[in-house]
């Protein structure tokens, strides 16, 4: 079962997503994420994928979409502790080094 | 997608290796999504069949059949999209995870066939 929750730590917005990141969920997720990208409170968006158990090309497209949008919105975008399944799929499509992957939120540089 | 989850559950009765089942599920998911998005269109209904052929201790053959208009994707070269491309990775993923795949259109039906050899030591029983 898919489950999304959010946590705000200062100017860092953490979106935790548990379940399968596939075509069935990305439209609604895009709408929710866009709120964080468009607002001024959140300078860094973190997608916690530690409990994401399945990622297909639609889910990859969703992550690339956010990454493209953050450039327009002048924000930072991080993938937090992707699960082994997510890492494997990102490696398969040669994107494992494209995204900024962190293992802990403390790795995000502090902003004034 | 419930269909691909069910196939993965079925394959667990035959194969020990969870990584391999994940690969096969991903392949099947990409094939089905292609039908939904590019065959019928996301808002349209249509018939989709998944056939699983198991050659014990040797290989698994998956077929996805649908009655959407002919799909010419697999006849084109499979390429890896650029990192900023938001779509177009489905066939690339399939090509990386199976040993052979082929597309056929006959009698109003598309068939995407995909085959992967499976090492003897990962079969159950």
Image (spheres, grey):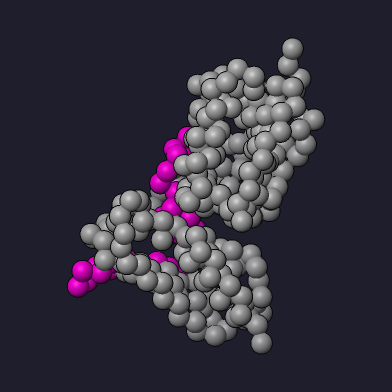
Q: Residue at x 52, y 29 (%)?
A: A34
Q: Position of residue B49 (x, y in %)?
A: 37, 71
- Could you say which is closer to the camera, residue A11 or residue B94? A11
The spot of residue B80 in percent (x, y) is: 45, 46
Can you see residue B14? yes
- Residue A29 vertical placement versus B38 (above, below): above
**Residue at 58% in and 36% down:** A98
B43 is within the stretch colored magenta? no
- Quadrant location of the C terminus of chain B in the rendered image: bottom right
Relative to B125, B44 lies left or right = left
**Numbered-mark total:** 0
For image coordinates 73% across by 16% down, the residue present is: A111
Position of B95 compared to A38: left or right? left
Q: Give above or below for B103 relative to A14.
A: below
Across and down, in percent, residue A86 comes to: 62, 50
Residue extending furthest toward the left: B107
Question: In the rendered image, which quarter is residue B58 located in?
Answer: bottom right
The x and y percentages for residue B123 are 63, 80
Please tell me which residue lies in front, A35 or B13.
A35
User: Farthest top residue?
Assistant: A112
As drawn, the residue found furthest toward the right would be: A106
In the rendered structure, which segment of residues is drawn in magenta?
B82-110
Asked if one can make out residue B75 in the rendered structure from this viewpoint, the answer is no
Where is A34 relative to B74, above or below? above
B108 magenta-colored: yes
Residue for point 70% across, 47% down: A50
Q: Nearer the viewer, residue A69 or B106?
A: A69
């Amino acid at each position: 079962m898919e489950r999304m929750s959010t946590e705000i730590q200062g100017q860092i917005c953490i979106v935790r997503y548990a379940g399968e990141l596939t075509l069935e969920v990305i439209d609604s997720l895009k709408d929710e994420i866009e709120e964080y990208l468009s607002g001024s409170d959140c300078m860094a968006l973190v997608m916690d994928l530690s409990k994401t158990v399945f990622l297909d090309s639609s889910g990859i497209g969703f992550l690339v979409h956010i990454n493209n949008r953050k450039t327009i919105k002048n924000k930072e975008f991080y993938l937090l502790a992707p699960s082994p399944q997510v890492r494997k799929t990102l490696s398969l499509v040669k994107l494992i080094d494209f995204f900024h992957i962190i293992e802990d939120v403390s790795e995000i540089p502090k902003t004034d | 997608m419930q269909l691909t989850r069910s196939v993965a559950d079925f394959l667990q009765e035959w194969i020990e290796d969870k990584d391999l089942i994940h690969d096969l599920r991903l392949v099947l998911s990409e094939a089905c999504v292609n039908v939904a998005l590019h065959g019928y269109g996301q808002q349209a209904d249509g018939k989709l069949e998944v056939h699983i052929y198991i050659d014990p201790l040797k290989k698994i053959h998956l077929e996805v059949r649908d009655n959407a208009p002919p799909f010419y994707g697999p006849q084109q070269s499979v390429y890896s999209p650029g990192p900023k491309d938001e779509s177009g990775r489905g066939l690339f993923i399939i090509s990386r995870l199976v040993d052979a795949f082929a597309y056929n259109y006959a009698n109003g039906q598309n068939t995407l066939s995909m085959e992967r050899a499976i090492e003897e030591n990962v079969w159950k029983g």
